[in-house]
Amino acid sequence: MAMGLKKRRRIRLIAGGAVLLAAATALMGYGLRDGIEFFRSPSQMTEHPPREGERFRLGGLVEEGSVLRGAGEEISFTVTDGGASQPVVYSGILPDLFREGQGVIATGRMENGTFVATEVLARHDESYMPKEVADALKEQGVFRYGGGVDPEPGS
């Protein structure tokens, strides 16, 4: 039984489309490989340590009494979620709202047991906490709503 010409064309068209879709997906994954940054809390880092040099975001609260200013723009502090703490080093100008006891998200890499931040973000007003940080703090039972406002709309 011979396959019809229309049926062969349809099969080739579908196979060609599948190959193009796979190639496009592979190219997107390759292009985004360095742009994807995962969020971790200090407790998650303790449970599943990141690879040396892996780029990710660390979030939690700036631990009270942990901020130390070094020479120039270098600053070190500790980020905690109540269950674990992680030392952080940053060289640069910190946001105006950065202070002890406040929520923070830092982007960077682990180097010799210390998180070396390339960017530090602080919460932008008294009632806002980044969702990732709020969720991590809730898991540890130390989350407190700022000014009585729920940071998650609709909850």
Image (cartoon, rainbow, N blue to C red):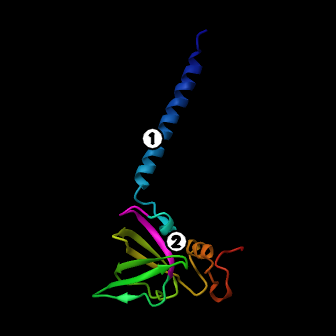
Q: Quadrant of residue 9?
A: top right
Name the quarter where the C terminus is drawn.
Answer: bottom right
Q: Residue 144's x, y, as percent?
A: 63, 84
43 sits to left or right of 146 = left
Tell which residue pokes out farthest to the bottom in this image.
65
Q: Residue 58's x, y, as percent?
A: 47, 72
Tag on residue 43?
2
**Badge 1 is on which residue?**
23
Residue found 43% across the figure and 87% down from its top: 66
Residue found 68% across the figure and 87% down from its top: 148
128 sits to left or right of 108 = right
Tell which residue pokes out farthest to the right in this image.
154
Between residues 142 and 91, which one lies in front from this camera angle?
Answer: 142
The verdict on residue 54 being magenta is: yes
Identify which amino acid the numbered label 1 is placed on: Ala
Q: Is residue 88 above or below residue 146?
A: above
Q: Are marks 1 and 2 in contact (CB under 8 Å)?
A: no
Identify which amino acid the numbered label 2 is placed on: Ser
Q: Quadrant of residue 142?
A: bottom right
Q: Secondary structure at mark 2?
A: helix
Which one is closest to the eye, mark 1 or mark 2? 2
Q: Which residues are magenta?
A: 50-61
145 sits to left or right of 83 = right
Name the quarter where the N terminus is drawn.
Answer: top right
Q: Residue 99's x, y, as percent?
A: 47, 88
Q: Secondary structure at mark 1?
A: helix
